[in-house]
Image (cartoon, rainbow, N blue to C red):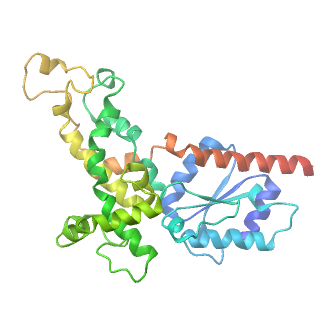
Amino acid sequence: MKMTIDEVLNEAIMSSTPAIIVEGIDDLKTYVSIANQALDRFEVYAIETIAGHTGGCDAVVDAIRTLYALNDASHPVENFVLGIIDRDTREYRGELPAENAILTLNYYSLESHFVCEEVLSAALSQYARVHSDGLGPNFSLSLFESIEHDILDLYYFSLEALQCAIDENYATEFKYSYSINRRKQEPTNSNVRAKAPQLDQLAAQLGLQRNLDSLKKISSGKWLLLTFCEIMYSTLGDLANYCGKFGSEKCQFCRAAITGKCTYRMKEGVSNKTLYSTASENYHLPSLGYIKQRMSQISLQTASVNDLSS
């Protein structure tokens, strides 16, 4: 049987075990894996498994606010329960929750955190034939910087979707509900790019710039990670063109002028889906550090409160 939200809190108090509430099944494995690095003991609940709540970020917020309405001051909610929600467009609609028991992600969604140089470096290590020892210390960073321009192709389409999300009367060419590949179709592609000056004004008003950090805040995380993996797949397929570049060593076959055997090649059996799965299972990224830190804080608070009451 489903637990009620107040039962989740009571269980956390009685067992001194922090309860982490997340939006749904897609996030569950990732947050369990992140929590394993931050906490000795914990419970992670998908919000739809709690009685009276459906999935999604609004349900997480409603559940936490229900706890605040029911709770007495002797056991502060934020000392025992942490709800984690995607940022999506809340910041730009003025809807960021203020409750201490809610952690709003720094970026649009969890997937956004996996678009980074460290993920590319891990893909090179796992899927390129060349040994990482031969690449040199700056190869993956330089390669990431070289593909960042292609990732930023999403910028104006994300701004267009954002404008639609914050202005219901806006005549939009592109929405968050669309497939990201629709941006390549005509007349959508041309129409959105023609709006660039208008969208630049929106960006200026919201403090956004055409860089990766801003893109992570406004692009759907699934769009962004899917596009990154497509670009990464293409880059790995052309990796032989980077043999000896970015401070790396030329492989022994190229040094010997033996064609067709460059070790800067991708292994067989790799696909976009392979890269997507590998990227989203990298739980040691620096970009996830603030989530682990917040989880650690609730663990310390839980232990502190129970020490005082014992």
Residue located 31% across and 45% down the image = 148
Does residue 36 appear left or right of residue 174 in this picture? right
Percent x, y for residue 157?
31, 64
- Which part of the image, by quadrant, shows the N terminus? bottom right
Residue located 57% across and 51% down the image = 32
Instruction: Out of 197 and 158, give the one closest to the viewer.
Output: 197
Percent x, y for residue 71?
82, 69
On the image, which quarter does residue 131 sit in? top left
Percent x, y for residue 234?
21, 45
Percent x, y for residue 177?
37, 73
Q: In this view, does 121 lie above or below 110?
A: above
On the image, which quarter does residue 220 sit in? bottom left
Residue extending furthest toward the right: 310
On the image, which quarter does residue 7 sit in? bottom right
Number of numbered tags placed on the structure image:
0
| Residue 61 visible in the snapshot | yes
Residue located 29% across and 64% down the image = 197
Instruction: Out of 292 and 33, give the one closest to the viewer.
Output: 292
Q: In this view, does 29 lie above or below 96?
A: above
Does residue 132 appear left or right of residue 254 in this picture? right
Residue extending furthest toward the bottom: 169
| Residue 50 visible in the snapshot | no
